[in-house]
């Protein structure tokens, strides 16, 4: 199952009851929130589009962090920071029960990441099989991810893709000083605990 499930005692009780060991993929929250902003801008039906659609990218992105989510009652930046913090805390307390994978590690070496994932799930296949899986999936996603994000969001079922650029570290060329200060204040500790920064001096 591919889910966006957040940590909760109820969810943990469920996965423990059925014997599931989740694999959690996290990403640098700065890049993730930029991706979320562009996703919103590509979907006029998104609940936040009417609020940020007329703003410049700099203004719109900043606004997208703080506009209260009408479903959750929490600012998006706080929601996603908490999502990462909770799963990391759980993985530290139960290292054998959950695998944390960084998106950036997967982008850098998908072969090594897949081998790590397979080892965690006790699936033993050879290097050639792993390499073939990687090759097949790269071709599949090249085909699916042709076109811009708006076009990809119109695809249905398994062909639907929310993938934009997927660039690691793209925040460095996007962030203004105001963006940096916002993140340091609201999600600085998350960047540290998730291993993306050592302190707040970035």
Image (cartoon, rainbow, N blue to C red):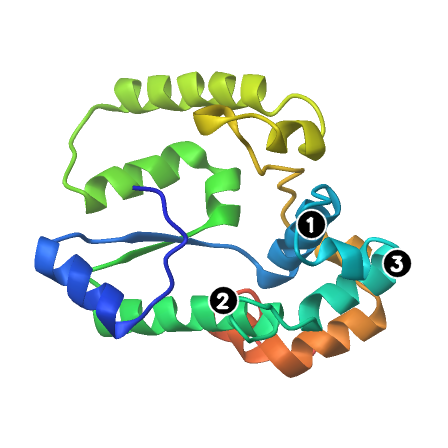
Query: On residue 195, which mark appears?
Result: 2
Q: Is residue 3 left or right of residue 163?
A: left
The quadrant of the rendering that contains the N terminus is top left
Q: Position of residue 86 (x, y in %)?
A: 38, 72
> What is the C-alpha distance between the residues marked 3 and 2?
32 Å
Q: Nearer the viewer, residue 26 or 192?
A: 26
Which label's residue is closer to the chain start, 2 or 1? 1
Q: Is residue 130 left or right of residue 107?
A: left
When the figure is inspected, residue 160 is found, relative to residue 48, above or below; the finding is above
Q: Is residue 59 left or right of residue 102?
A: right
> Mark 3 Cα within 10 Å, few/some/many (few <14, many 20+)?
few
Circle 1 residue? 40
Image point 67% across, 83% down: which residue?
185
Q: Nearer the viewer, residue 49 or 183?
A: 49
> What is the C-alpha distance between the residues marked 2 and 1?
27 Å
Mark nearest the camera among 2 and 1 is 1
Say what secondary structure mark 2 lies in: loop
When the figure is inspected, residue 8 is found, relative to residue 27, above or below; the finding is below
Say what secondary structure mark 3 lies in: loop
Q: Position of residue 148 (x, y in %)?
A: 72, 29
Q: Position of residue 195 (x, y in %)?
A: 49, 67
- Asked if one can make out residue 93 in the rendered structure from this viewpoint, the answer is yes
> Mark 2 Cα within 10 Å, few/some/many (few <14, many 20+)?
few
Image point 68% across, 27% down: which residue?
151
Which label's residue is closer to the chain start, 3 or 2? 3
Query: Do the numbered discs 2 and 1 sit on residues whose CB atoms are within 8 Å?
Result: no
Query: On residue 55, which mark appears?
Result: 3
Say what secondary structure mark 1 lies in: helix
When the figure is inspected, residue 32 is found, relative to residue 12, above or below; the finding is above
Q: Nearer the viewer, residue 95 or 198?
A: 95
Image point 52% across, 55% down: which residue?
27
């Amino acid at each position: 199952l591919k889910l966006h499930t957040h940590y909760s005692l109820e969810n943990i009780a469920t996965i423990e009851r059925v014997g599931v060991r989740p694999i959690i993929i996290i990403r640098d929250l700065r890049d993730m929130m930029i991706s979320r902003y562009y996703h919103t801008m590509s979907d006029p039906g998104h609940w936040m589009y009417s609020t940020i659609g007329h703003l410049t990218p700099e203004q719109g992105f900043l606004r997208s962090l703080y506009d209260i989510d009408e479903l959750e009652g929490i600012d998006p930046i706080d929601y996603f920071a908490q999502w990462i913090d909770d799963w990391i805390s759980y993985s530290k307390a139960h290292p054998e029960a959950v695998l944390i994978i960084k998106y950036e590690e997967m982008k850098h070496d998908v072969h090594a990441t897949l081998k790590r994932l397979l080892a965690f799930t006790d699936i033993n296949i050879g290097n050639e099989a792993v390499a073939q899986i990687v090759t097949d999936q790269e071709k599949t996603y090249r085909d699916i991810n042709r076109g811009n994000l708006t076009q990809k969001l119109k695809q249905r079922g398994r062909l639907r893709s929310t993938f934009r650029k997927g660039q690691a570290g793209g925040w460095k060329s996007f962030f203004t000083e105001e963006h940096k200060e916002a993140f340091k204040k609201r999600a600085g500790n998350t960047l540290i605990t998730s291993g993306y920064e050592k302190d707040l001096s970035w």
